[in-house]
Structure formats: structure tokens, C-alpha cells
Amino acid sequence: MNIHEYQAKEVLKGYGVRIQEGIVADTPEAAHEAAVKLKEQTGTSWFVIKAQIHAGGRGKGVVNETGSHGVILAKKLEEVAEKAKNILGGTLVTHQTGPEGKLVNKVLIAEDVYYPGASEPKEYYLSILLDRATGSNVIMASTEGGMDIEEVAEHTPEKIMKEWIDPKVGLQPFQARKVAFALGLSGNAFKEMVKFITALYNAYEGTDSSQFEINPVLKTSDDKILAVDAKVNIDDNALYRQKELAAFRDVAEEDPLEVEAGESGLNYVKLDGNVGCMVNGAGLAMATMDMIKLVGGEPANFLDVGGGANATTVEAGFRIILKDPNVKAILINVFGGIVRCDRIASGVVEAYKTIGDIRVPIIVRLQGTNAAEGAKIIDDSGLKVFSAITLKEAADKVKAVLEA
């Protein structure tokens, strides 16, 4: 589960990570009030206005309606409301959102931390994530922090150092020092970075996260180390024990069909193809999608109805798939191990009649317990539903439908 920058910073602050202070607002008037309050709290006279969406690249992104960038600076208190107005309610398009962009419902009014001092401020990149290949957590750090970290990773990967952490023993002090040394820090800035890394790792583990990305981490002109931005992804499987973090979920940032599927207990991911898939089991779903591609189609979704599929879940799956206008056919692929194929077939027929006006052909491949009985129910239904025995046969029927 992704959370917004302002929420991520709240989490980090709770673990002792120094952050760029800010106040969230959802109207221009609230943005002005937030700036006034922020000035009283921090003494800042410049204000950074940051669009809050679940996507990176906001600084270079553009709001379609106004031409404003997603992160802008107000050098006067009087400018905050007007500049926030140019972002709020607009569609922000970045390299991560795609051309459709994301609607901006909130902005973060943040303090200016690039103040003058004894030395020039410096930006770094720091992230912690799970390396599934090694079964370890890994800290990734670079001296090239800022908006172009993707280009650094692509063209000069040697500028990104990695430190693997054994999850059984956790982050060791020498490892935090090793990262700080790799960033070229010394003196008080070095000590501050070691504290920052340690607190950040504690936050990562304490929140059951799968990714923490701080870009940039800023060394201020007086050698403080703080998080100017924060991208946090929390493991969905751990939300049952992270009740406070689960409340941070913003369904407005998620695909509506995926939200609806989750409410029905279905595992659904929308794709860009033309063949809707409904399968029981993630591995079988992946194999089904592969077969669709092999016969020249493109899967429109990943949809796993689970091992206990029944008429209710089948109907819910139908309704979700049919909301995608790109779907030209639906392939249902069920292995009847726990569930009986004849019950699934009856559920398909019942759901078809309940929904009504289904204008795309449906191919149903059933294997396992009572598969023959299930196929007979499908064949005798008189509906635009076709049975298949093997996965290849089902895929060929999908191909014939697409070519018709």
C-alpha cells in the first residue's frame, strides 16, 4: 500500500527521523492558513507547495489545466493561496502517472530548508527495500540525489552503493557508518547521517514496509540531515497488524476496479489487453495470461477468484471485467481441486443470467472434480458460453473469437 508524502513524513518523524516540516491542505484558503501556521512554528519565509499524489517526478510534472509544475516555490506568504490554486483540482502528469495523469486533491505546504549558511546544501539519495533474490533488506545510497536519480541508475550505476542487511540481526552500527562514509561525509554531518540511517531503518522495519525511498536526503548548510521527500510502500500482507497505517489508505489514488475487486475478496490487476481473465489460483492465472498472448491476444486483467470460488464471486468477477470497454472476450479457467467444476459452471450460468446483456463471448475451461458435468452444464445452457477441456483448446477458442 502506497501512502502520501505527508503521511510518510509523519511516520518517519515518529521514529526520530528529521524531516522537512509541512502542513497538508485541500483548498487554497487552507493552504494560506497552513503557511501562516508553518511560519509561526519554523520561522520560514519561503514555502514549498507540493502536490500529493501516489507518483514520483512531481517537480517536473505539469498540471494540465494550468501549466503549473507539481512542486513550486512561493517566496511570499501572499503567493501561497494562488499557487496552491494552480495545483489543487488539476490533473498532474508525470513520467510515472502516464498521459492520463492523477487528480490532485491535496497539497503539502512545506518549509524552505535550502537556507543560506556556512556551506552549500547537498542532496543525496537513500532507499531501503527488500531484495528478494538474497532474502535480505538492502540500503541503496548515492551522492547524486534529486529529480534525475533514474538517469543516474541507468547511465552511471556505479554512483549507487548498496549495503545488504541480514534481517535476522538487523542494521549494525558499522553498516550505517559505511553508508555515511560512502556518501563522502565527515564531521557533524557524518554523525547526523549515521543517526538518520539508523532511525530510517528502524522505521522501515517497524512499519512492515517493502520500500522506503528518500529523495532527496538533504545535508543543510549547517550540517543537519533531513528528509525533504519520502516515498513509502507498506506490505499489504502486514496491514492486519498495522491498523494506524492501514487508515492512511487513499482509495482515490487507486484504480476503481481494483478497489471494487478488493471489496469482493478478489485479487484483480487491470492491464491493457482485450481478453478478460477469471481464474482460481495465481499460478494458473499467470499460465492463462501466457496462453492468451501465445495465440495473439492480450490479457485485459489478472483476476484470481481464489480456491473457494462460487456463484457470488464469479458474478462479481464478471461485473468488474465487463466494466473494461476494451474486453472482447472472457476466458474462465478453473481447476476443480477444492471447488467442484459443476458448481462453478452453475455459477457462471447463474451470473450470466443475473447480469444480462453480456455482449462478449465467454470461454470456460474446467478441469478437475466433476469437470465433465460442468462442461455439460455450460453446453446445455443455450447461452453465449463455450466450454473447453484443455487450456490450448480454450486459448484457440479465444483466438477464433478475436479473429471473427
Image: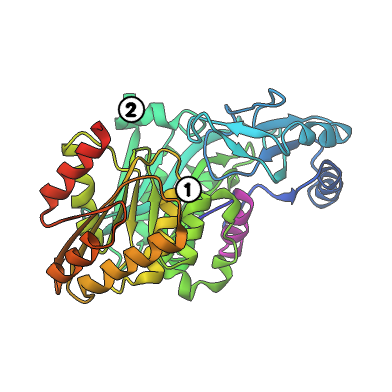
Q: Is residue 372 above or below residue 188?
A: below
Is 6 a magenta residue?
yes
Amino acid tagged 2: Glu
| Quadrant where the image shows the C terminus | top left
Q: Residues within 10 Å of mark 1 (few under 14, many from 20)?
A: few
**Badge 2 is on which residue?**
154
Task: Say left or right for 335 vs 319.
Answer: left
Residue 48 visible (yes or no): yes
Which element type, helix, strand or loop, lies under badge 2? Answer: helix
Name the foreground residue: 99 vs 241. 99
- Regarding mark 1 in the picture, which secondary structure is present there? loop
The residue that appears at 55% across and 66% down in the rendered structure is: 245
Q: Is residue 168 visible?
A: no
Q: Nearer the viewer, residue 10 or 31?
A: 31
- Mark 1 vs mark 2: give the one in front: 1
Task: Tell me the magenta residue range.
Answer: 5-16
Q: Position of residue 243 (x, y in %)?
A: 54, 73
Whole-percent x, y for residue 154 in the image = 33, 27
The percent position of residue 145, horizontal first and vertical second, equals 48, 34
Left of 166 or right of it: where is 97? right
Is residue 238 within the magenta segment? no
Residue at the disc numbered 1: 323
